[in-house]
Image (spheres, grey):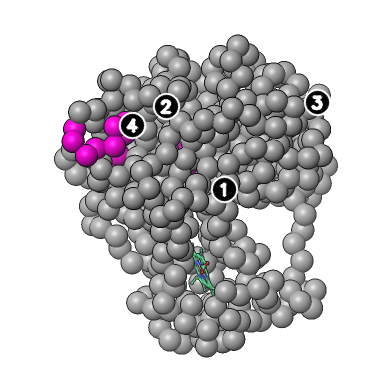
């Protein structure tokens, strides 16, 4: 694959990386690796705390802000005992005391280096151009100055709205973010992985003006994924209606700060599908009396469709469409076959792409290809009768998030290919699906930061949500 143009060394590196990557999903689980402490940090901790300890889904280790106290004994205790309900695994079973001590010293050393200015993070390239397998493209910052953009919805050719995970919502007009956030959203639970997630316009938005939002709702009994819709009037959301809200007793205590799901998609008939992660309560994924760990289906106004699989079953949550999911952060319909796919953030080594069908059980936590973040096993089972197999899975995990099929005209060879985003791996990948199988994967770019979603624009470009900006991917001029 010959590099197209090499404006920066970073692009050269990127192109070289792309060229060097051949796809075989080499499937072996890593144990906790002792020895080089920087290695074992990279293997065991970087996926959440960041490759350079700068933070990611878990706090930074460099900023000297601690919830456990920054002294060596508190750090060692945090590592050994973890905070499982907040997503920090307990490592005491798999790390020897000497390894815990080495890790604490490593964390302290890195923090000191950072404070002395010996660790700095190179800013990711603002723009790159890459010759990928099927198309040469250019990536440019489209809108900057954002804080963890989560999703983007185009309302017309030159007007869009963007959600930020922390709970803010902005209009973007002609590629410019509005100065003030939109008012009128309900209160949002912005702790841990909780926040504001997807935004999707109604299929007949031009006629009815409805815009749908998924977010972590701070309820009385804790938090749960909730869906509302509203209309944009100037810079304010009005006529807000709840489309999905769990019963108060099914909310999960606020100490659990993981796995809300929060992706939505409409099918061709105007039915709304959305995902709710298992909220860190694994067994709930198999329990159809609970909303978490499920993909749901509702009419656009929140009514239960008569054809839902658990309608009439006493105690079952009537909106459930499929179950046994961990944290489905991507949902998309195949533009030709109409099949529904879910992209599921798994445990370590257990990210999955599933073909989601009515009433089916996708197995979590009874079957999985993943293991605990600590390296301990979850189950020996990867298959079980009555439980569905993923179409593909990733070992090691990419930490997958949002996805979309490409349906634009700017990149004809990408038509109907699936683009998936990832957090820890910082990759945008292109997948070709033929006869329900993934027959090809390509990394489109890597190393520009965590990617939460990828959306096709009305102009045929692809828009990727990067850590503090939206990047536009279009053919080289
Ligand atoms: C699956 C994600 C995940 C992995 C993997 C992980 N952590 Fe954590 N860690 C967290 C989260 C989330 C928190 C914050 C918990 C809280 O809010 O109390 C945390 C907190 C911590 C803290 C306390 C930080 C503070 O602010 O007080 C330390 C120390 C820590 N982790 C060390 C490690 C080390 C060392 C490893 C690797 C051996 C590791 N973590 C792997 C998610 C992770």
Under circle 3, the secondary element is loop
Q: Which residue is mark 1?
A: 188
Residue name at image x 32 percent, y 54 percent: 282
Q: Which residue is mark 3?
A: 174
Using the numbered discs, state the Cα–Cα distance from disc 1 to disc 4 in whole angstroms. 23 Å
Q: Quadrant of the C terminus?
A: top right
Relative to 476, 432 lies left or right? left
Q: How far apart in space, not on screen, are marks 1 and 2 (Cα)?
A: 20 Å
- Image coordinates of residue 134 in percent, x first then y, are 61, 26
Q: Could you say which disc has been placed on residue 232 in the image?
A: none
Mark 3 and mark 1 lie on one chain; the one further toward the N terminus is 3
Q: Are the two marked residues, 3 and 2, in contact with CB atoms closer than 8 angstroms?
A: no
> In the image, is residue 159 above or below residue 24?
above
- Ranked by sequence position, the earlier of labels 1 and 4 is 1
Residue 325 counted in the magenta span: yes
Relative height, residue 315 to residue 409 (above, below):
below
Read off the residue under disc 2: 302
Which stretch did the figure color magenta? 313-332
Query: Mark 2 near ligand 1 (CB under 8 Å)?
Result: no
Q: Earlier in the sequence, mark 2 or mark 4?
A: 2
């Amino acid at each position: 694959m010959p590099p197209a143009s090499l404006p920066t060394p970073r692009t050269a590196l990127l192109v070289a990386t792309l060229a060097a990557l051949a796809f075989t999903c080499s499937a072996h689980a890593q144990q906790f690796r002792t020895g080089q402490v920087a290695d074992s940090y990279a293997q065991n901790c970087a996926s959440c705390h960041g490759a350079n300890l700068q933070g990611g889904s878990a706090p930074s280790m460099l900023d000297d802000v601690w919830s456990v106290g920054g002294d060596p004994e508190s750090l060692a205790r945090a590592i050994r005992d973890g905070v499982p309900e907040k997503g920090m695994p307990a490592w005491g079973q798999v790390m020897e005391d000497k390894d815990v001590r080495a890790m604490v010293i490593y964390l302290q050393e890195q923090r000191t280096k950072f404070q002395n200015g010996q660790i700095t993070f190179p800013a990711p390239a603002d723009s790159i151009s890459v010759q990928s397998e099927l198309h040469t493209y250019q990536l440019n910052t489209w809108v900057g100055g954002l804080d963890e953009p989560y999703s983007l919805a185009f309302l017309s050719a030159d007007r869009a709205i963007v959600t930020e995970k922390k709970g803010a919502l902005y209009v973007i007009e002609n590629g410019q973010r509005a100065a003030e956030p939109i008012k009128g959203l309900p209160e949002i639970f912005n702790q841990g992985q909780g926040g504001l997630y997807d935004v999707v316009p109604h299929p007949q938005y031009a006629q009815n003006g409805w815009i749908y939002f998924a977010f972590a709702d701070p309820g009385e009994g804790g938090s749960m994924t909730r869906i509302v819709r509203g209309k944009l009037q100037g810079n304010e959301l009005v006529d807000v209606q709840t489309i999905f809200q769990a019963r108060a007793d099914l909310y999960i205590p606020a100490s659990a700060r993981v796995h809300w799901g929060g992706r939505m998609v409409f099918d061709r008939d105007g039915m709304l599908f959305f995902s709710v992660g298992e909220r860190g309560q694994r067994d709930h994924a198999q329990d159809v009396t609970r909303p978490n760990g499920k993909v749901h289906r509702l009419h656009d106004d929140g009514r239960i469709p008569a054809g839902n699989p658990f309608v009439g079953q006493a105690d079952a949550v009537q909106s459930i469409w499929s179950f046994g999911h961990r944290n489905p952060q991507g949902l998309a319909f195949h533009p030709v076959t109409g099949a529904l796919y879910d992209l599921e953030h798994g445990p370590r080594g257990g990210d999955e792409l599933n073909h989601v069908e009515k009433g089916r059980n996708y197995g979590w936590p009874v079957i999985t290809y993943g293991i605990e973040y600590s390296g301990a096993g979850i189950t020996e089972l990867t298959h079980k009768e009555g439980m569905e197999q993923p179409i593909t899975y990733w070992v090691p995990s990419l930490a997958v998030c949002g996805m979309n099929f490409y349906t634009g005209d700017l990149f004809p060879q990408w038509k109907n290919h699936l683009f998936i985003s990832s957090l820890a791996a910082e990759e945008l990948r292109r997948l070709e699906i033929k006869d329900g199988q993934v027959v090809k994967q390509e990394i489109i770019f890597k190393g520009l930061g965590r990617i939460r979603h990828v959306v096709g624009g009305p102009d045929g470009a692809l828009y990727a949500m990067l850590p503090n900006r939206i990047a536009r991917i279009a053919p080289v001029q």
